[in-house]
């Protein structure tokens, strides 16, 4: 419990202070990069204060000059602040539409080109895919937790189809990512957090020419992500 309070307190204090400095700068200059970098620093430092250590595997194999769609599993609220700061270059994510209504946070997400999505509205989902494609055309990666929801038991849930429509639309390489350990550190339904080691495996990119059909791509991504999970979390 104490670790969680320390992390959340750090975020609660530093986020508005940094916003006072970097929001005006971004509005005046139109340059969102300093705001993005300080946001990444806040996320990464908060996780360190919580006693979570990260082992990265495979990130070095990616070409820094290319734009990717990262597709990851999702077992914990701590997954985004663990994964996103470790992706080279800027990345956007699809976020629940409700979060954009939160003062400061919502404004920061809009400045950072994050994409709102209404999970219960099919037409809104299509619009989100199109918005994400426009973001990627700016050279910004897209990071998506393809299950759409957190898993209760650490095993993969059924995948959402939207991310695969996006990959098809953009013809961008898809990078499967396996996050292992967050189910133990902070499982769904528990507020308290344990210290521990989390492993993030960045698998080999799947090139646009290898996609085949959308369903084949989905099965390939699922099998790849699952291959990085401990045996007890595989189907």
Image (cartoon, helix red, strand yellow):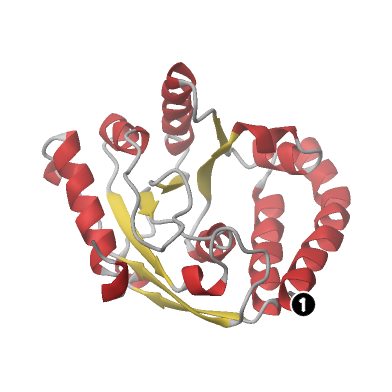
> On the image, numbered disc 1 is attached to which residue?
2
In front: 102, or 210?
102
- Say if 99 sits above or below 226 in the image: above
- Say if 198 sits above or below 64 in the image: below
- Which image quarter holds the C terminus? bottom left
Q: Measuring 38% from the left and 52% from the top, which residue is drawn there? A: 70
Percent position of residue 146, x then y: 38, 46
Furthest residue toward top: 123
Q: Measuring 45% from the left and 25% from the top, which residue is drawn there? A: 125
Q: Quadrant of residue 106?
A: top right
- Which image quarter holds the N terminus? bottom right
Q: Quadrant of residue 139?
A: top left
Q: Quadrant of residue 122?
A: top left
Q: Measuring 81% from the left and 37% from the top, which residue is drawn there? A: 28
Can the viewer see residue 193 in this picture? yes
In front: 14, or 99?
99
Q: Measuring 64% from the left and 71% from the top, which residue is drawn there? A: 47
Left or right of 41? Residue 19 is right
In front: 132, or 214?
214
Percent position of residue 172, x then y: 29, 42
Percent position of residue 107, x then y: 74, 37
Left or right of 174? Residue 214 is left
Can the viewer see residue 206 in this picture? no
């Amino acid at each position: 419990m104490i670790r969680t309070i320390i992390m959340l307190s750090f975020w609660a204090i530093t986020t508005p202070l940094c916003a006072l400095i970097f929001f005006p700068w971004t509005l005046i200059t139109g340059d969102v990069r300093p705001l993005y970098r300080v946001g990444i620093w806040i996320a990464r430092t908060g996780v360190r204060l919580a006693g979570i250590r990260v082992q990265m595997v495979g990130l070095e194999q990616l070409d820094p000059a290319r734009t990717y769609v990262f597709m990851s599993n999702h077992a914990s609220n701590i997954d985004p602040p663990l994964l996103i700061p470790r992706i080279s270059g800027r990345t956007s994510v699809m976020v629940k539409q409700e979060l954009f209504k939160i003062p400061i946070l919502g404004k920061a997400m809009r400045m950072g080109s994050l994409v709102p999505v209404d999970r219960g509205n099919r037409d809104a989902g299509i619009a989100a895919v199109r918005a994400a494609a426009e973001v990627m055309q700016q050279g910004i990666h897209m990071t998506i937790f393809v299950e759409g929801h957190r898993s209760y038991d650490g095993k993969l849930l059924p995948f959402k189809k939207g991310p695969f429509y996006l990959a098809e639309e953009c013809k961008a390489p898809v990078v499967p990512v396996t996050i292992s350990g967050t189910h133990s550190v902070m499982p769904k339904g528990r507020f308290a957090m344990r210290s521990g080691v989390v492993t993030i495996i960045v698998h080999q990119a799947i090139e646009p020419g290898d996609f085949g059909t959308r369903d084949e791509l989905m099965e390939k991504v699922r099998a790849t992500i699952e291959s990085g999970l401990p045996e007890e979390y595989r189907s």
